[in-house]
């Protein structure tokens, strides 16, 4: 097989950011574009080539919410090949704090809102974000 070109399919790398305050209220954006257009989601997006995932989280939070996040903490990685209908993505989830007064929908966000875990069932969530938010809620309750 020497000399043959082998092509590999590689998942795309994304980040999602759970921006929250001391009352465990958090920011969700309403998606402007497919997939899941009109659904609510954690702010996030694709990691650019040459960019760290931490910097991607900071950039995506700013682009979609206008919030400068701080205290960025790695939470968990989600890699189900079916989590995004476009292609296989691996998402690194970060927890962060930010000033909600700066919140403004921008870039791929149609709208932005501050939510509590109590109202999650009332919203249509994109991707696997309901599962992610359930895991984060459990984490915050335990810590």
Image (tube, grey):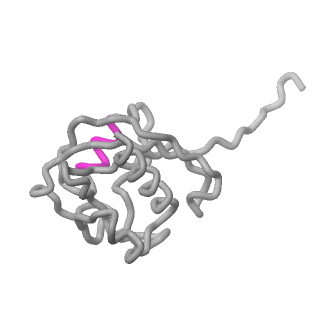
Residue 98 vertical position relative to residue 7 in the rendered view, above or below: below
Q: Could you tell me residue 40's position as x and y percent?
A: 37, 68
Seen from this angle, which residue lies furthest right? 1
Residue 52 vertical position relative to residue 90 in the rendered view, above or below: above
Question: Does residue 38 appear in the picture of this structure?
Answer: no
Task: Residue at 23%, 64% (x, y): give it.
Answer: 114
Task: Residue at 31%, 64% (x, y): give it.
Answer: 29
Seen from this angle, which residue lies furthest top? 2
The residue closer to the viewer here, 135 or 57, is 135
**Magenta stretch, overall SS:** helix
Q: Which residues are magenta?
A: 55-62
Quadrant into which the N terminus falls: top right
Q: Is residue 38 left or right of residue 105?
A: right
Q: Could you tell me residue 74's position as x and y percent?
A: 39, 35
Residue 96 vertical position relative to residue 88 in the rendered view, above or below: above
Q: Could you tell me residue 141's position as x and y percent?
A: 35, 48
Q: Is residue 92 magenta?
A: no
Q: Is residue 58 magenta?
A: yes
Quadrant into which the C terminus falls: top left
């Amino acid at each position: 097989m020497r000399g043959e070109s082998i092509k590999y399919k590689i998942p795309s790398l994304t980040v999602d950011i759970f921006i929250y305050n001391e009352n465990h209220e958090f920011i969700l954006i309403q998606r402007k574009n497919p997939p899941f257009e009109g659904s609510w989601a954690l702010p996030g997006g694709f990691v650019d080539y040459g960019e760290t995932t931490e910097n991607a989280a900071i950039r995506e939070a700013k682009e979609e919410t206008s919030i400068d996040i701080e205290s960025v903490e790695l939470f968990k990685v989600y890699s189900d090949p079916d989590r995004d209908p476009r292609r296989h993505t691996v998402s690194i989830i970060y927890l962060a704090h930010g000033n909600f007064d700066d919140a403004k929908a921008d870039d791929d966000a149609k709208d932005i809102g501050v939510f509590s875990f109590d109202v999650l069932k009332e919203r249509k969530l994109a991707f696997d974000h309901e599962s992610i938010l359930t895991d984060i809620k459990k984490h915050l309750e335990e810590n």
